[in-house]
Image: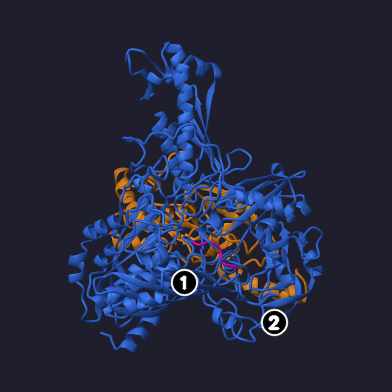
Chain colours: A blue, B orange
Amino acid sequence: MIPDERYYVTDVPPETPEPADQPAPWTTTTVVGKRLPRVDAYERVSGAAVYTADVVLPGMLYAAVLRCPHAHAMVRKVDTSKAEKMPGVAAILTDKSPGADVPWFNARTGPLSRLFDPHCRYEGEEVAGVAAETPYQAWDAVRAIAVEYEVLPFVADAEDALKPGAVAIHQGGNRSGDVTRYGRGDVDAGFAAADVVVEQIYSTACEIHAPTETHASVARWDGNRLVVWDSTQGVYPIQSGLVQLLKLPSSSVRVIGHYMGGGFGSKLSVSKHTVIAALLAKVTARPVKLHLTREESFLAVGNRPPDTMTLKAGVKKDGTLTALQMTVLGTGGAYPGGGVGGVDWVVRDLYTCPNVKTELTDVFINAGQARAFRAPGHPQGAWALEQMMDQLAERIGMDPVEFRLKNVPMVSQATSGTPPYSSTGLKACLEEGAKRFGWSEARKRARTEGPIRRGVGVAAGLWRGGGGGPPATIIVKLFADGSANLNMGASDLGTGTKTVMAMVVSEELGVPLEKIQVEWADTATTQYATASGGSKTVPTESPATRAAALDVKQQLLTMAAAQLKVTPEELVLKNGEIVSTADPSKKVGITGVTALRGRGLIVGVGYRGPNPEGKVICPFGAHFAEVEVNTRTGEVKVTRFLAAQDSGRAMNELTYENQTQGGITMGLGLALTEGRILDRSQTGKMVNRNWHDYKIPTAMDVPVEQIVIPIDLHDYQANSTAAKGLGEPATVPAAPAIANAIYNACGVRTPDTPVNPLRLMGLLAASKKRG
Amino acid sequence: MPEDSEDPFRKRTGVTRRGFIATIGTGAVAAATVGPSATAEAAPGAEIPDAAELLRVTLTINGRSHRLLVEPRWSLLYVLRERLGLTATKLGCDRGECGVCTVLVDDKPGYSCMMLAVESEGKTIVTLEGLMRGEELGPVQRAFVEEDAFQCGYCTPGQVMAVEGLLRANPNPTMDEIRTGVSGNLCRCGAYAHIFKAGQRAAELKKQEGGRA
């Protein structure tokens, strides 16, 4: 699955009206680019922000879901008779309930399952739903439902899934889609021409998104109209999902997704729990809240697929890459989940290389379905490629930064016709990053003796998406008193979307941020937007916002021109005043425009126009890590980190820095601490389905010094605000930078994540590098 | 810091913690064998509620006294969020791992998901709402705004309470002490670097304002 399919509209051509005129580039900016606190900071620190999990409605019931406790089982009988009579229980839904036979997990061949399918293909698959007066009573009832399971043999590993005699998870076997193949040039000739050829197997463990707010939905019916509060990355995709599943017109499904507690790709489309909440609300005629438990969030609402990657690379002594060959085996769980999607893109496109061949195999196992997870496939591929680049650099005796700089491409080699990038800051990221990090000096400081070793590492990356694109519609309203309202359908995941869009309005209309009200993420009251994902929200929504603000401005200047008896073309809007450039004495304040006072407000509409033809828009980054390795305990401490990012224009340096540090932190988790553990031999069940046993980075794990360098390239070829996406590219190179620093410190390669103390001690012992 | 050297679980309104736990265990057995009216031995002097019986408690939250009927098993977090509408305190794991439910219990940060409402009686509970003066943010909250010390904001109430608790005990923390102070509060967005800065800034702001909450 290519990343685009998860984030963009694919079933209809993404066409929206073009803006009348492409606005001219900003020559200077007074608001955009500044370090400004968020427009919704007050709500988020005061507790005023209402997240879906916080919604409390009169008469509301609480739901809980009975989930299959086995990795693979057939439900033979569900007996709810005892549970139905328990205190507080209002309704129980099972596969037999009227209206519950909702088809699910659609593949090309048709639905693979249904809402409460008796064939449970992973631990955590839904068997029944309960609504009760309190969550405690709902869970009492879940525990009182008697289920007869026929426990089936399971597959908990991608390699096992392809072995002869492996249990078939679906009728067609355990292959998820066809093998994906890519090739250019001739890799055999490339390897023959190389001075050095290295081959290595790498693997990344399955990661869980684990947002602090688990998935949550609140459903309420007003007659035959459904209102859903959902913790989601996109209200419109949730609406369209519900419309299809419940067979309702769009006008009967309102989805509200105001504040949400993190998604990272796991909240892009409609989940079963949302439908269960809606159906329970229907049968009880009362609002229902379903807020998943932490354990459920580890099992049933997505993950980053685990991948095993064999990478072979050839290089000449002068640092010219001659061939790259990658074979990937991955799994997106028990249903099509993009188990290998995007994994080879960095191999295909990050460095200049004439001969590339990749082959990716995606299989089913008995585990929860994967979902998009912060740059799908890219962190896995970078884990392999960027360690390989380090290995090659060492073999040819070249500095790892120099080696990468020698292979920086200006065109997207893997895109048909090898079009140029609209902009690439990869070279600048590497050069500026190395300079600010003190790369050369830090490498000399490496300590390779004694129990505590110190070393530094570098890695680079790109994100295939990040250019954004249509459709998007934005409305900006200017009130007669000079304040404004911004209306957009996009969600703000905590990435600062609302703030950046308000800054664009402020830039164009001169309205201060505190006088801009933002209305967002509600299908009943805000404009169409695709889900916030794929690092495309800023490059998609900000040009549309600028177009809407310019539409307002044009109307305002036309009104003022009539009043001042001049032409609109000679007027400019500056500091809240409309002034004639021909005769500066002719001017009027916004509040003095009588036509605006008469009408009450101006409504401006902006659309996202198409991306440029023949260009590829990608953000880039280079990361530098310094680590200390305790060779007696296997502990790795990241002491210093620097990230240089090219995401086009940095729209707000403060939130840009924050989001990049978030990418660093998540990459640190990939490298050192995170991994789903399935009990492969006995039960197939996940054994670390909580935050105690599945470790995400804490305040003690991250370095205090996390420097972020925005390579502030204004990419007006990409769009009218010159910005590219940031969220995903900011995490792609982080993990391999740490791995390379570990090698620099203690001379041990770490091909498998997570590099936890146990694993590193094993590697150190095997290589006899213990201090 | 309160100078409270007494047993922190001392009897306040008839339910001691020890007696309460004894009741939970025996009550469940009793209900299963001879019916809900059966009683069992417990700590001397303790009333013995039935597991499903609503208990009358008085909770002191943000300086106000709340009289409530609660099930013995209800957590403080559940009562705050779903019964009192104090939803600034978040639910993240319900098992003492993430810290998004952090409140101040007698000035010390504590996980409200790991406390029962009945054992919160007699303690002074402060939630994020309690740091506000009307609509105005407290100094720790303002520091979080200035330093952009959050992304999605869901862990933020817990982070703010952890910093508030730290600063009440230690008005001049070092960077290491700030890190330790928020080490029980997970942030999946990874805003830690800004949270550390907010901790430093909060200490300054608090001092400027003479230590008000």
Vertical side of B192 occupied by A313: above or below:
below
Q: Position of residue A746 (x, y in %)?
A: 27, 79
Chain name for mark 1: A
Please state if A519 lies on the left or on the right of A45 as rendered.
Answer: right
In-front residue for pair A81/A348: A348
Q: Is the stretch drawn in magenta largely helix, strand or loop?
A: loop
Callout count:
2
Question: Position of A217 compared to A223: left or right?
Answer: left
Examine the image and state in which quarter residue A149 appears.
Answer: bottom right
Q: Disc 2 or disc 1, which is closer to the eye?
A: 1
> Relative to residue A347, is residue B154 depicted above or below?
above
Residue type indicated by callout 1: Thr
Q: Can the viewer see residue A30?
A: yes
Look at mark 2 in the image and give the residue it sits on: A152
Q: Mark 1 = which residue? A: A358
Residue A298 is one of the magenta-drawn residues: no
Could you say where residue B31 lies in the image, as x and y percent from the top left?
A: 74, 72
Element class at badge 2: loop
- Pick whichever, A234 or B90, lies toward us: A234
Category of crowding for the residue at label 2, using alpha-carbon neighbours closer than 10 angstroms: few (below 14), some (14–19), many (at least 20): some
Say which label, 2 or 1, has the lower sequence index: 2
- Spatial separation of the CA atoms under disc 2 and disc 1: 35 Å
Q: Quadrant of the C terminus of chain A?
A: bottom left
Residue at point 38% right, 70% down? A385
Tell me where the magenta segment starts and ends, as one range.
Answer: A369-373
Disc 2 residue type (three-letter): Leu
Tags 2 and 1 both on a single chain: yes
Label 2–label 1 contact, CB within 8 A = no
